[in-house]
Amino acid sequence: MNWKQSLFKPKWQHKDAAIRLAAVNTEQDPQLIGSLLEIAACDDDARVRCAAIRRLHQLKNILRLYDKETDAGTRVLLEDRIRQLSVSTAASRPPLEVRLQVVAHTTDKKLLEQLASQAPEAELRRAALAKVERQGLLGDCCMQDSDPENRRLAAGRITQQTTLKRVIKGLRKRDKSLYTQLQQRLHAALLEQADPAAVHSEAVNICAALEHLALATGDQDRGATATLYAAWARIKKMAAADMADRYQRVRERLEAPAPMPTPEREAKPRQEAPPQETPPQETLPQKPADTTRDAPPAGAERSAAARQRQAALDEQQRQLEQALSGAQALLTELERELEQGELHKALATRARIQQAGKGHGKHKGWQQLNQKMAGMLGRLRELREWQHWSNDKIRKRLIAEMQVLPAAGLHPDALLDRVKSLQAEWKALELSEQIPGDKHFASAPWMWRKFNAAGHLAFDTAKPYLEKRSEIQSRHAQSLAIFCAELEQLATASPTDWTALSKASNRGRKKLQDLNSVPAKQRQAFARQLKAALDKANTAMQQHYQSVEKEKMKLIRSASQLLHLPERSEAIAQAKSLQANWQAAGSLWRSREQALWTQFREHLDPLFDELKQQQETTRVALQEKLAAQTALCEDLQAILARQDDLSSQHGIVLGLRAAWKDIEHPDRKLLATFQALVAEYQQREKRAQQAQANADRKRWWLKSALLHELAVGAGTATGTLSKKTLVKVEKDWPEDSSGDALEIKMDDICGQFLAGGTPGPAADSTEDLTARARMLCIRLEFVAGLASPEDDRELRMRYQVERLAESMAGGSARLPATDEAHAAEKTWLGMYALPEAEFEAYGKRIRQALTAIMEE
């Protein structure tokens, strides 16, 4: 370890869990890889442990971690990793012993089922099968597992009879031995349940076996008879009456003593036909027979019967000789074919001779012919050996062709077809070398093993594709079954959704043309099921079409009468109602629907053409109306876009508003736009008026201040104004005037001062004027809600009492606070003659009160 490593630890050992997590997730340092197991076991943070677990690939290590882990989330991840590694089929999968340990301890049903069906090792599949309980999977494994022991284990764990029946059906051509065992097991189970079909089958088998024993010659097999008696005793109470009668008859026959042969019966020739049995006659009392009269007719009957028997024997002899003659000709042809080495023709001729000789084995002529044919068997075998030598070359070619199939790059279907054709050719070779009646002749075992192994290898190449296609086809089959059920449900539902049924029928016809997407064994069944569902749907749709067509013909006749109505508005209303009814009536197939719709529209189009003209006229008028409203809005917008004084545009705005009022039913959006523009104009006009009022007030306060300066200057000891004061006031006096009475009066007073004179004597003395100014301050402060100075508290309370008394006495109505403030302001501006100190103090208080009132 160098000094850097001793000072700077790697990131996966950092104290910050987030840094350790990032390092474990991404870094490929060999030291980190070697430490993953330790990190997964000992790290304090569960996220870091999970990241290390995801990078572990040794199943035995993960199992040890699972036993020690306490965090629930981490245990879930460990279970997932155990499942992934246990079901792996890769070459680097965990050892078999470790996976067997997983199977022995796990309770995960999905894992066990997956291992039982997909594990590559037969031993692992067997261990999983021993713990699987799902009957369907056991049945699949019993049919599909390649190991015979596994198939027997799965079969032994099947308990449901439905699954057992399915397995028996699937094993009929795959495993004859297991197929027979399961059949016997199912049959025994059904007998225990007293199944009628099983009981009847068992009774038939017992009776047939007993009848066979009764017909057999020689000593009877007492052990077999006792076994059959015991089997019948087990089903005796469940067997049907007719089978019980049959059993009783055959048992009586078996237990009856064997009849002794008589000399007369032994002396009869074999060719003589047995005498015909006469039906039993009822026993009736008869008169004594007249033997003299009845004897001649009885002898004549016996003579006729003898002649008939002789004729039958002659005909039988003639047919036998004819068959023997034909067989001798065939024997000559067989000799010629053997001489020429024509093995296949010789075998065919030999088979014809054997077919003709059936039933004549004890005839001397046929015995001689069979002896001659048996003498030719050596030649047949010799030719067969030559044929076998020739066929071995073909077999070697077939083996070579089969061995190159996996690497040929063929499509799986083409590869499978080629495998089947090679197998058929091999089987044809085997059949061509067989001699009927001789022991089976087969090719060399090593050749068959080599050919069979190559065939399995070729099939394994296509097996994944076939399994995937089978899975896809199974899903399609399931989807098709659901579709058929839904189609039948739509066809029989009440009320019926005809639109959905029509679309489903179209889909069904397409699916009927594409049945290749379902397994081949199920195609015919699905075709029948789909056709039946389509037939039901088509029947329901045809009935619906008839009712819809009848209803729409009524609507067409009703539409033809609308042109004769005097009121066009009523005709159009009815036409719209008919159109709604047309949609509600439903729809037909496209061609018929279009034809009826054309007829229907021929009667309605003239009405709607007139309505269209009226609507066009109304539309033009509406557009003109909208254009006029838009023009008014644009004119008002143009006025608002100007930056000059809006007071000059007041008359124009009034004209625009009057023009808008003349419009009936204006457009809502344009009305809202025009009202917003008017409101904006009014706000701007109000702001302009307020600005003018503020300018006037500011000017009034300036003039009052200048008059105060003149009044103070005139009140000096000399009684005259200084030239400096006169020049300053004349310079600062505003030229503008609002025409208000107060401002006009202030202009006159100023003019008198500037003219060198003085205004007339004041109406109030200085003390009275000061008292009035003081009360004016208290009044405004009360209205503004401001506190008055401590010296004016008593006057303030007295004013409040007087004001309340005046209000309760019902005196003059009070003005609004703003109007009262404006009136008080004008009164104050007229008090410019106050002394300097009072003018400054009271002016400040009045300004504060006015500001508070105006801002409310």
Image (cartoon, grey):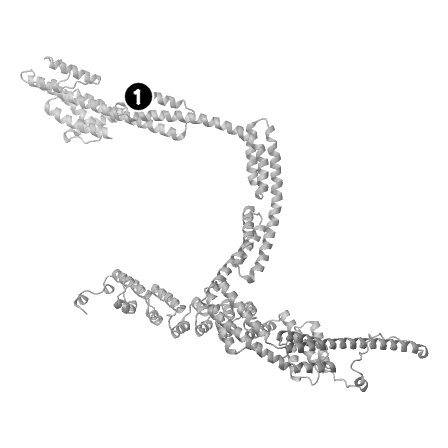
Q: What SS does tag 1 mark?
A: helix
Viewer-proximal residue among 586 and 353? 353
Q: Residue furthest front?
A: 340
Viewer-proximal residue among 370 and 640? 370
Q: Which residue does the image show at 22% across and 65% down from the upper left?
A: 10
Q: Seen in the image, is 27 located left or right of residue 83?
A: left
Above or below — where is 325 with respect to 461? below
Q: In which quarter of the image is residue 49?
A: bottom left
Viewer-proximal residue among 10 and 456? 456
Quadrant of the frame with the N terminus = bottom left
Q: Seen in the image, is 843 located left or right of residue 275?
A: left
Question: Is residue 833 among the parts visible in the rendering?
Answer: no
Viewer-proximal residue among 405 and 501? 405
Tally the marks: 1
Which amino acid, by three-letter code, is at mark 1? His
Which residue does the numbered mark 1 point to in the structure image? 650
Q: Which residue does the image show at 59% across and 28% down from the upper left?
A: 565
Q: Seen in the image, is 277 located left or right of residue 250?
A: right
Residue 725, how many percent across, how many down?
A: 8, 19
